[in-house]
Amino acid sequence: MPISTAIKKTKRVVPEDGAARPALLLAWYDRHRRKLPWRPLSGGRADPYRVWLSEIMLQQTGVKTVGPYFEKFLARWPDVDALGRATLDDVLRMWAGLGYYSRARNLHACAVAVRRDHGGAFPDTEEGLRALPGIGPYTAAAIAAIAFDRRTMPVDGNIERVVSRLFAVEEPLPKAKPLIQQLATTLLDAGDEKARAGDEKARAGDSAQALMDLGSSICTPKKPACALCPLNDDCVSRARGDQATFPRKAAKKTGALRRGAAFVVTRGDELLVRTRPEKGLLGGMTEVPGSDWLAAQDDKAALKQAPTLRGAARWHRKAGIVTHVFTHFPLELAVYTATVPARARPPEGMRWVPIATLRDEALPNVMRKVIAHGLGQ
C-alpha cells in the first residue's frame, strides 16, 4: 500500500499533512526521555562510539540486559581505537552471556575497520556506515540519525508498533516493513529546513529516540497507556478500539527440535573444553565436547560421538536434560560426565581449564547451563 493511500484511509482522525505530530512527539520526549548510559543529557552531543556499541548490543536484546554489558565494555575499551586493538578472544569473553555471538565478532571486525581505514572516526553518512562490518540498514540509520543528526528514521520493534497503531497498518509483518518505514519518516522533525534557516538545530536523532521511548514506555505490546500518549488524538487504531491487536504479524515458523549430547569431563579441579570453529553458530566460543545437534538423533548415536579419554571411568548420564532455544530451532542436550586421572592429557584440539576461572571463558549460555548441570551446581 503506498503512503498516500495509507494517509487517505486515516484522514477522518489524522490531519493529511501530519505537521503537528513531530512537534508533539519532541515536546513529550523533552519531558519524559529515558536516562540511558549511552544517551547524553538533554542538549548534549551523542558519542558515535557509544551509539554504535549500544545499537549492536541492543539487537535482539533488551535495555535492562544490555546496560551492565555496555558499562563493562566502556570501562575496558573507552573508545573505538581501544576496542580495535583488542583481540577477538577478549571481546568474546567480555560478551559471554549476551547471546547472538555473531554480533561480538562483527563488533570486533567493525572496530578494527574503523581504526584501520577511518582513523578511529566513524563515517557520518548511512552509506559510509553500511560499508562497515556488521552494520546493516537499520543500524546505519540509527547511528546516522542519533550520532550525526542525519534526517533518516531507523525503525526498530518499538517504532514498528507505534507506527502500525497510529496508521492502523493492516498488512502483517514482515511484509509491512517498507510501508511502516515510509510512514515513520513522516514523524521526523523538519530539522534540516530549520537548521538552514538558522532557527534551531536539527533533531532527527531525537525524533527517532522519542518514538523508541514512546514504544517502550507508553505504546507497549500489551495494555498500551493510550491516555498518556502525545499522539493519541491522531491514532487510528485507538479511535477504532483495536490498538492492542497491532502490529499484525504473520505466523512464525519454528525449526525442528534438535537433540545431542554434551560431555562434562573433569580432571581434579579442571574441566575439558574446546573452541568452536570461527564460522557458524556460536563461532569462536568455548564449549565442552559434544555431539552433533541433529533432528531426531537418539541417545545411542549421540553417545558414540563422545571424546576418547585415556584412563577415564565410564560415562555417567545426568538425570534430566538441558534445553535451550536458538533463533531458528530448539535444542535438547543429554549431559554425560566422566573423570580422568591427574596426568591425563587432553584429546587433540581440547584443553584443560580451571573450573574456578570459567567466568573468564567465552562460554555461551547453553554451555553454562550444561556445565552447571554436569557439575551439579
Image (cartoon, rainbow, N blue to C red):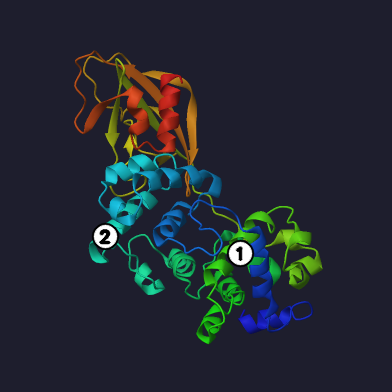
Residue 260 position (above or below residue 39): above
In the picture, which quadrant includes the N terminus? bottom right
Identify the residue shown where x is 45% and y is 19%.
376
Instruction: Work out how far the residue at label 2 is from the one at label 1, CA to CA, in angstroms.
Output: 31 Å
Where residue 89 sits: x, y (%)? 28, 42
Residue type at tag 1: Ala
Q: Which residue is mark 1?
A: 210
Tell me the quarter of the picture where residue 10 sits. Answer: bottom right
- Contact between labelled residues 1 and 2, with CB atoms less than 8 Å apart: no
Identify the residue shown where x is 31% and y is 19%.
266
Q: Earlier in the sequence, mark 2 or mark 1?
A: 2
Instruction: Give the SS element for disc 1.
Output: helix
Tell me the quarter of the picture where residue 265 sits. Answer: top left
Where residue 308 sits: x, y (%)? 24, 24
Instruction: Give the SS element for disc 2.
Output: helix
Q: Which residue is mark 2?
A: 115
Residue type at tag 2: Arg
